[in-house]
Amino acid sequence: MGNRMNEGFKLYTDGNVEIELFDDDLMIFSVQGSKNDTYQVSMNENMWLCDCDDYQYRSEKEPGSFVCKHLWAAFFKVAELKNED
Ligand SMILES: [Zn+2]
């Protein structure tokens, strides 16, 4: 788990998180992964989703509790944006 957080933090600090939409109850981010693939991370009414394979596979086994590195990257971006207010 800790590894994914560190990898997500690296994606965030490397500037790989792009904001597509930022609203209180709907957010969409494009996160570029380590292999140059781009994944879509979205938050809709506090439900977070990522379209990467890691998330699809793991969230079936751990519904609602799994956080992939792209989600972590988006969380750091959200924290930054909220701090700016
Ligand atoms: Zn992901």
Image (cartoon, grey):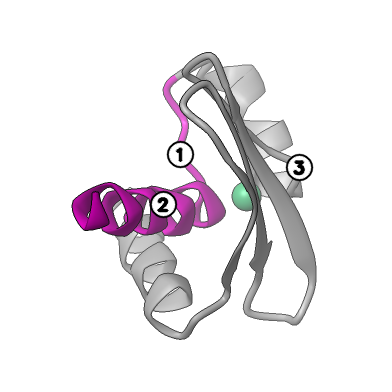
Of marks 2 and 1, the one in the foreground: 2
Residue receiving disc 2: 72
Q: Which sits in the foreground, 63 or 39?
A: 39
| CB contact under 8 Å: marks 1 and 3 | no
Q: Is residue 52 above or below residue 47?
A: below
Kind of residue indicated by mark 3: Asp
Q: Which mark is first along the chain, 2 or 3?
A: 3
Q: Alpha-carbon distance for marks 3 and 2? A: 14 Å
Q: Which residues are magenta?
A: 65-85
User: Which secondary structure type mostly characterizes the magenta part of the structure?
Assistant: helix
Closest to the observer, 62 or 73? 73
Q: Amino acid at mark 2?
A: Trp
Return the residue found at the far front.
Answer: 85
Q: CA distance from mark 1 to mark 3?
A: 12 Å
| The quarter of the displayed image where residue 36 is located | bottom right
Q: Position of residue 29 (x, y in %)?
A: 63, 52
- The picture quadrant where one finds residue 77 is bottom left
Q: Residue at x 57, y 76 (%)?
A: 16
Residue 67 disc label: 1
**Circle 3 residue:** 51
